[in-house]
């Protein structure tokens, strides 16, 4: 496995307010997303904003106030679907708690969620909407 973090996602309580901050306050341009999530292409990784309750549910956590849920997740993006299964299996053997087993995701990819031994949330995902370069940069595919 490569050492890389391809996505950082923050849970937000008001997506409109959060988008205003990142887009008007920091001058970022939204590069993707739906009504409850926004993605921004950064220098080699993707930054996401996800409505907090939907984020907790998608990560298999029992509500927005789930113990230990900090409203954020680091993302390990893989180049293949099969690699998701391999990463999850390795992480589980090393002490991870699996909150969502590998599955087909509603957004067209394949993902799982797990927490490290200290409760930090990770999404392990194969995303057909991303390109991972040889250098490990994560780029949103342009239509």
Image (tube, rainbow, N blue to C red):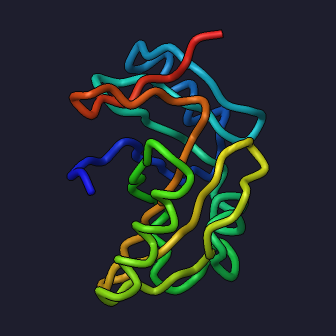
> Is 66 placed left or right of 28 in the picture?
right
Q: Which residue is most to the front?
A: 82
> Is 95 placed left or right of 131 in the picture?
left
From what the image shows, is residue 4 above or below residue 41?
A: below
**Residue 23 in the image, given as x and y percentages of width and height:** 50, 18
**Residue 31 in the image, given as x and y percentages of width and height:** 56, 18
> Is 92 placed left or right of 80 in the picture?
left
Residue depicted at x 73% and y 57%: 104
Could you say which is closer to the camera, residue 7 or residue 110? 110
Quarter occupied by the C terminus: top right
**Residue 111 in the image, given as x and y percentages of width and height:** 59, 58
Quarter occupied by the N terminus: bottom left
From what the image shows, is residue 62 above or below residue 46?
A: below
> Is 43 placed left or right of 132 in the picture?
left
Residue depicted at x 49% and y 15%: 24
**Residue 77 in the image, given as x and y percentages of width and height:** 43, 47
Residue depicted at x 26% and y 28%: 134
Residue depicted at x 43% and y 68%: 86
Could you say which is closer to the camera, residue 133 or residue 72? 133
From what the image shows, is residue 124 above or below residue 115?
A: above
Quarter assignment of residue 83: bottom left
Task: Count every numbered label the image shows and give the total.
Answer: 0
Quarter assignment of residue 73: bottom left
């Amino acid at each position: 496995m490569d050492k890389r973090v391809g996505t950082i996602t923050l849970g937000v309580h008001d997506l409109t307010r959060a988008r205003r901050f990142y887009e008007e306050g920091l001058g970022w341009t939204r590069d993707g997303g739906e009504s409850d999530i926004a993605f921004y292409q950064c220098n080699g990784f993707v930054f996401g904003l996800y409505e907090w309750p939907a984020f907790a549910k998608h990560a298999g956590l029992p509500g927005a106030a789930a113990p230990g849920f900090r409203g954020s997740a680091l993302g390990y993006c893989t180049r293949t679907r099969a690699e998701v299964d391999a990463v999850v299996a390795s992480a589980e053997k090393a002490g991870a708690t699996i909150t969502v087993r590998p599955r087909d995701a509603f957004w067209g990819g394949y993902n799982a969620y797990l927490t490290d031994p200290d409760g930090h949330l990770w999404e392990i995902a194969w995303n057909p909407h991303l390109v991972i370069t040889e250098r490990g940069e994560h780029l949103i595919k342009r239509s």
